[in-house]
Structures are given as C-alpha cells and as structure tokens.
Image: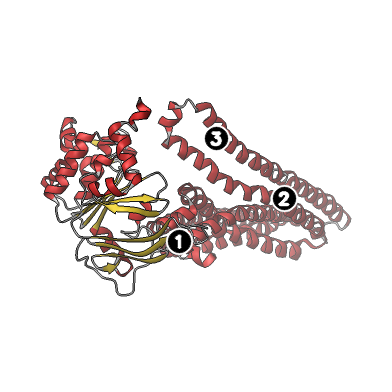
Amino acid sequence: MIKTLAKSIREYKLPSILTVIFIMGEVLIEVAIPFITANLVNSIDAGEPIINVIKTGLILVAMAFASLACGGIAAITSAKASTGFARNLRRDMFQKIQGFSFSNIDKFSATSLVTRLTTDITHVQMSYMMVIRVAIRSPMLFIFSVITAYTMGGALATSFVVVIPVLIGGLLFVAKNAMPAFRRVFKKYDKLNESIEENVRAMRVVKGFSREEYEKQKFASAADGITEDFTKAERIVALNNPIMQFCMYFNTVVILFLGSYLVISSSGKSVNVGQISAMLTYGVQILMSLMMLSMIYVMLTMSLESMKRICEVLNEESSLKNPENPLYEVKDGSIKFNNVNFKYNKDAKRNALEGINLEIKSGMTVGVIGGTGSSKSSLVQLIPRLYDVTDGEVLVGGEDVRKYDIKTLRDAVAMVLQKNQLFSGTIKENLRWGNENATDEELIEACKLAQADEFINGFTDGYDTYIEQGGTNVSGGQKQRLCIARALLKKPKILILDDSTSAVDTKTDAFIRKGFKEFIPNTTKIIIAQRVASVQDADMIIVMENGKIANVGNHNELMNTSEIYREVYNQQTNGGDSNENA
C-alpha cells in the first residue's frame, strides 16, 4: 500500500526531504537551548561578568531565530510536498478511473469514487504532512530530550520513569478505543454522498412527488450516523488533554520539590538551579512529543481506511484491455453476433443476454424493440466494448471487437445513451466532444440533421449559448437532439440511438430518421425505441424478450409472425383491442 501511494510523490520528493532536514535542525536547536539556558542561569548565580552573560544571551537569541527559521521553512516545504502529493494522487486516480470499464465503475459506484477522490485524499494529504513533519520531530525530540535530561538531571530524571509509562498507557488506551468509531465513519460517508447526489439529480422528481420531508429524514439519518460516530471518537480523544495535563503537572511538582530539596541539602553541589530549569523544559518537551506521537497514531489510523480505499482504485485493473497487436482500422459498419451470452457479473445466476445470433449489414437501419428489462441496451453496449461478452463473439467490420484498439473502435461507433449528458460550457463546446476540430459549418450541418439548428438559433447567443451543468437550462428533447448532433460529428460507421428520441415529438422523430436515411446512407443505424413508429421503416427490426431475440424481420413480416410486435403496434396505433374499448 505504501509503495502504491509513494508513486504519486514524484517531483515532490525534494520538498519532502528538505522538510525532514529542517525539522531535524529545529529539534537539535530546541534540545540545545535548555542546556545553554541552564549554563546561563548558573553563570548568573555564580556572579559571572555581565559581558559573558550577554554573550550567552545573544547565542540563545540566535539559536531561537535559527529554530524559528528551520520551523518556518519546514512548514513551507511540507505544505508544498503534501498538497503536491495530493494533487498527483487525485490526478492518478482520475486517470485510472477514466480507463475503467462500465463493470469497474459498477463495482465501486459513482458516489464512492467521488468520496475517495475528495474526502479520502484529504485525509491522506493531512497524514502525509504529519508524517514528514511531526512523525520526524516527535520521536527525535523525545529521544534527544530523554538522553539530555538523564545526562544532566541525575536524580531529577527519575520522575520520567513514572510519568512516561502513565502517559504512553493513557494515550494507547485513547487511540485503541477511538479507532473503531473512526473506521465506521468512512463507510458512512459514501451513504451520505449517495443521498446528496440522488437528491440533487432527482430534484424535480422529489418535488413532483412531494417527498421533500422523506429526503430530509433520509439525509438526516445518514448525517446523524456520522455525527454519532465522530462524537463518540472525539469524546474518547478528548481524554488526551487531561492525561497530558496530569503528567505535566505531576512531573513539574516532583522536579520542583525534589530539586529544591537537593539544592538546599547539598548547597547546590549535587543539583543546581540551572539543572532544575532545564529539567522542567525537557519534561515539557518529552511529554509534548509523546502527545504528538499519540495524535499521529490517531491520524494515521484514521487515514489507514482512506489509504486502503484509494489503493483499491489505483490497483484496480480495467476489465477491458487492448490486445497486444490491435487493429487500427474499422473496415465498415457491419455487425455480427455469434452465439453471444453476457452477464454483468461473473457470479450472476442468469445471463442478461443469451444465445444471441445476429447479422447486420453495413448501412442498414435496424430497430430494436422490447419491454423494459428485455436487455435492449445490453445488446448494443457490446458493440463498442462498453462491456465484453461472457461467451461467443461480436464482430464489427468482420473482426472481433476485442482485436481492435479500443479508441479506434469507439471512434467508429457513436452511441447516444438513454441518459443524455451535456457538460457545462457552450453549445459549440458540447458539440465538439464529437469532433474537437469540427468547423462551424460542420456543427450547423450536424444540428440540422438532428433537428437542433432551429431551436439553437432561437437562443439569444445561438451556438455560443452556455449550457448549465447537466444541461438543466434546456428541455429533454433539446438535450437529446444536441446529443445526437454531437454523435453525428464523429462521422461514425455505426450510429446507436438508445431510446434517444423518446423526448421529441413524432414529427421531429420522423424528420431525424429521414435525415439519417438521406445524408448518412452508408452508416449502420441502430435505433432502440419504445414507439413502433420510430422503427417501423427500418430495414430490420429486432424484437427482444427476457434477454433473447424473440423475432427478427421487417414491419410487415413481424406483423404476421411476432405476437409481441403485433400487440405493441396495435396498442400504440389503435389504442388496444377494439372489444375492450367498446
């Protein structure tokens, strides 16, 4: 796990190393200051000339400034190293996710991936900063302070024998009991984000069904779960302070009491005032370093779950791989399914598609119709390798799709999905997702073909109209037509419309199909639709039922051979059986 995360440090190794070096310098100076201070106190007590006292005082001032400088530089370099590490880590995760197949995305869920890219990386960033700063400073300060304290403190150092085990035991108790609550929190973050995302995306549905109160309760439940675990953990962690205060005051009382007794009884020969001053300072340093170590332990344990979740993404291998010697040219838009079976999960009990045998010639217009859950979308998603078949093969241009370079294949297949997605930016910027080098004339031509040019010109800014995130400032039908135009700009060999004209009226739908027939006759067109009118003129119509092909033929053939098709047609054109209407 550490090796996986360390790969994202890259160009920030130097700031990380410099942080460690300056922290070491700061610690060495801080440990030396009490020692010199003790000598200064003894010099004053012994009546040293004022010039010697001033020299020692100036040395202490210089050391204080040097310590401050080291600490300041370390703060700058650690901030640069940790934020840079987080940036690289976020970029590496995002690039990894971009290479995921749909099945990989399904495995993690979108909300979980968002949490990992945000909350989890923030925790790891904070932990990394603590590791290169506090995790170096605290152990060094503890070790050097203990060694120096025992060297110059003599009998006074015995107080540490009692205080250190008590503090360590208390801090370990706190960390051990707080950790389970912290671990539970991260899993609940996913549920909270899921609740937020669902609510925002489906705001119109929520308001349409007056489910605001239900959504509030759902969100409150997720938020309360996180609050409860955090409160429990923080309540335990809050014990750190009283434990620390007890040990610090106990140590101070022992040193002052025992030190005063030894100074008076030995007339300053065995222990002097300077030693008492140094021991008090070293005591604070030792206890503070242990306190910081406990906080590091808590932070690292909290971040451990985040680290695991991040590494799960970074170590995940896409289920879709390019072949060793891929094909970089798709000959034509012909499609063939040979004995295809498909399931979304290898552990699934039944296939989503079963026994699919189908041949589509290049340039054909093919309609796909069937009830909800008949796997119409699953069928077409195998063509551009959004998923891979479980058994059998899918051929495009006479070659198995798994032989193609994935980018080459997907450039040859334009797909407009059921959930049309537009991105924040102008209409032109959205359209050029299909072809970033498309001219304005090509944009207009594609929009005319998709019956989008008219409404675009109705906007004040025309093609420079800004589209809000998710396309919320255009209607469903307008969004669908823009997505179709975007797909056409790819000039694909295969165009797949997955129920992509459901939000447009039948007249506009007919114009779109007429445009396809006249202007892109050599492109294979696959139209998934709920309306028979959208596929009635197709060269071939595929009727799907329960993941299987029930019937194949043109409209007239299916009216004679397919009960499913005939029933749908009659319901949509005649309003159902005439006897029932009567």
Measured as percent of width and height from the top left, residue 351 is found at 46, 58
- Which is nearer the N-term, disc 3 or disc 1? 1
Looking at the rendered structure, the kind of residue marked 2 is Asn
Please report the residue visible at 28 percent of the width from the left and 59 percent of the height from the top.
410
Category of crowding for the residue at label 2, using alpha-carbon neighbours closer than 10 angstroms: few (below 14), some (14–19), many (at least 20): some
The amino acid type found where label 1 is placed reads Pro
Residue 292 placement, left or right of 316:
right
Q: Nearer the viewer, residue 184 or 543?
A: 543
Label 1 packing within 10 angstroms: few (<14), some (14-19), many (20+)? many
Residue at numbered disc 1: 15
Q: Residues within 10 Å of mark 3 (few under 14, many from 20)?
A: some
Q: Is residue 390 above or below residue 471?
A: below
Point 45% across, 62% down: residue:
9
Quadrant position of residue 419? top left
Which-is-in-front pick, marks 3 and 2? Answer: 3
Splitting the image into 4 quarters, where does residue 293 fall? bottom right
Labelled disc at residue 302:
none
Query: Label 3 belongs to which residue?
Result: 219
Secondary structure state at the residue bearing disc 1: helix
Helix, strand or loop at disc 2?
Answer: helix
Query: Which quadrant of the figure contains the C terminus?
Result: top left
Left or right? Give the position of 125 relative to 559.
right
Look at mark 2 in the image and give the residue it sits on.
Answer: 177
Residue 444's spot in the image, x, y percent? 13, 43
Q: Which of disc 2 and disc 1 is earlier in sequence?
A: 1
Residue 140 horizontal/vertical position (percent): 63, 63
Q: In which quarter of the image is the N terminus?
A: bottom right
Q: Residue furthest right?
A: 265
